[in-house]
Image: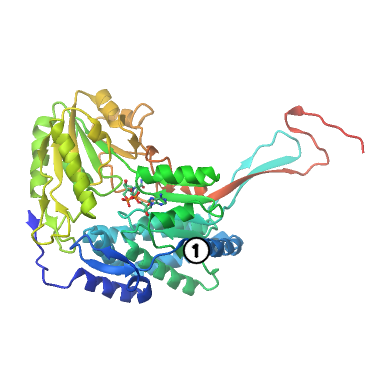
Amino acid sequence: MTKSSAAIGAKSVAAEVAEVMRAVGVPDASWRNGTRATRSPITGEVIAHVAEASGDDVAGAVARSVAAFEAWRTVPAPRRGELVRLIGEELRAHKAELGHLVTLEAGKIVSEGLGEVQEMIDICDFAVGLSRQLYGLTIASERPGHRMMESWHPVGPVGIITAFNFPVAVWSWNAALALVCGNSVLWKPSEKTPLTALAVQALFERAVHAFGGAPEGLSQLLVGGADVGAALVDDSRVPVVSATGSTRMGRIVSERVARRFGRSILELGGNNAAIVCPSADLDLALRGIAFAAMGTAGQRCTSLRRLIVQEGVSDGFVPRLAKAYGSVSIGDPREAGTLIGPLVDAAAYEGMQKALEAARAAGATIHGGERVLADVWPDAYYVRPALVEIDEQVEIVTHETFAPILYVLRSAGLPESIKLQNGVPQGLSSSIFTNDLREAEAFLSAEGSDCGIANVNIGPSGAEIGGAFGGEKETGGGRESGSDAWKAYMRRATNTINFSRQLPLAQGVSFDVEG
Ligand code: NAD
C-alpha cells in the first residue's frame, strides 16, 4: 500500500520546520541566511540554508573547548550530573517539537522521531546516576605498607562526529557521558541533518542557563561537511574523537587520529543477520524481522540485512514475509499509519538500485525494491522494501547497502547458519529466533555470533541505552552508551601509595645507595 499524503496541499515541510525552530528558540541567522541548502527527504524541498563553520572557526572552538574543560574538570562529578539532569528536563519539555523535527529533517515516522528523543532522555537519566558512580578499583599491593588504586580522570575535549540516521541520539550517547566524566564536547553533525543539531544546541543553552555557572563553550556545535570533521580529527588538542558513520569514513578518521596518538571511538557500518530455527515462534519472528528489516526504511546501522532461514522453516515462512513486504504502508512519515518513510536522498536510492542489479545478476529472485510516489514528490525517494531470495552469500550480500534490502539465505542447520552469519566483514548486531535452549546458548557462546550485539527472539535493531552499544571487525570496535562505556571518555591513572618508612622495590629488585 502506498499513501500519497492526504496532507498534500497542507502545510509545507519548510513551514513546519520554521514553527519548530521558533518554538525551540533557534536563532534565524544560524539556519535561514547561510550558504548550505538543507532538503527534507519527505518532499525533497529546501527547508533551510545553514551557516557553516570554517577551519578557523574549528580552531577557535577547540581553544574555547580546552578552556571550558580546564574549568569543568574541577567541578564535582555529581554537580556535573546536575547539568545533564537539566538537559534531560529540556528534552522532556520539548520532546514533541524535537521529535517532529527529526521526522521533518531525517524522514523518520512519528513514533521513531519521538523514540529518538526518548533515547536522549534515557541516556541523560543514566548519566545522572553515573555521575555518582565513576568508580575506580583498590588493588592489593605486593609491597608491605603500600596501597594501590586506580583513578579515573577527565580526559579533555571530546570530538563527536555523527551520521544522518540518528541525528540527535548519537550526540546524547556521547555528550551525556562525556559531560559527567568532566569533559567538554565539540559536535560535528551530519551535513544532511544540521537543523536537529541546532535545536539540540538551543536546548543545551537553556539547560546551561538554568544550571548557572557552566564554563562558556562547554558544548559547541560545528556545522559543516567532511572538511569540518577533518579539522576536528586532526586537532591534537582533542584527545578523543567519537565517529559514527560509514566504514569508509571510519577508516580515514581512525588513521588520522592514530597518527597523532589520539583515541577514537568508532561506530561504523553493520551487516546484521537473523537466524530462524525450526523451533522458532514464527509469528513472533515475522514481527521482529519486519520491524528490523523495513523499519526506518532500512536506514539503521542495526537494520536487518540478511535473513538465514533453516530448512524446514523456509518454505512456509518466506512467502509470509513476502506478503508483509507487499502490504506495508509507505508514504509521508508525518501521517499516522505510515510505517515506511523516504530514503534520505537520491544517492541512497541509486545505491539501492545498484545493489539490486548486482543481486539480480547473481541469480536472485527479488520481491519489491521499486520506487513509489515519484509522481507525487519527484525530488523525494520512496521505495518498496526489497526481499531478495539468493542462493549464496555472494559479494554484494557482504556489503552494507544503507536501504531496505533483506537478503534471504537458506541453511542446513545451526553451525552452517552461524558460519554464514559471521562470514561478512562487519560485526555489529545479530539475532536468533529459536525456542531451543541449546541453540540459543550456542549462538551466544564463544563459538556463536561474533557481533557486539547478539539477541534471542528479538531482531537486531532497537537497542536500549543500558547496554554498551557497538560492534566488532569493520564496525570499528567502539562502545557507547551504557554499561562501562564511560571509561572511554576518561583517562585512567594507576596510583601506588607508600605509607611505610621503608622503600621496598617491586619484584624484589634492590637498589641501595649511600647518601
Ligand atoms: P557518513 O560516513 O557519510 O557520514 C558520517 C559523518 O562523518 C558525517 O558527519 C560526515 O560529515 C562525517 N565525515 C565524512 N567523512 C569524514 C572525514 N574524512 N573526516 C571527518 N568526518 C567525516 O555516514 P552517513 O551516511 O551519515 O550514515 C550512515 C552510516 O553510518 C552507515 O554506514 C551506518 O551503518 C553508520 N552508522 C553506524 C552507527 C553505529 O553505531 N555503528 C550508528 C549510526 C550510523
Depth check, front residue: 167 or 322? 167
User: Residue 421: which quarter of the image?
Assistant: top left
Q: Is mark 1 within 8 Å of ligand 1?
A: no
Amino acid type at circle 1 is Asp
Image quadrant for the C terminus?
top right
On the rendered structure, is 349 left or right of 78?
left
Q: Taking 149 as reference, is 4 above or below it?
A: below
Dot 1 corresponds to which residue? 56
Residue depicted at x 29% and y 58%: 115
Q: Quadrant of residue 67?
A: bottom right
**10 Å crowding of disc 1: few (<14), some (14-19), many (20+):** few
- In the displayed orientation, state which residue is furthest to the right: 515
User: Going 51% across and 43% down the picture, which residue do you hit?
Assistant: 258
Say if residue 254 shows up in the picture.
yes
Spot occupied by residue 193 in the image (x, y as percentages of width and height): 32, 60
Nearer-the-camera pick, 102 or 39: 39
The chosen color scheme is: rainbow
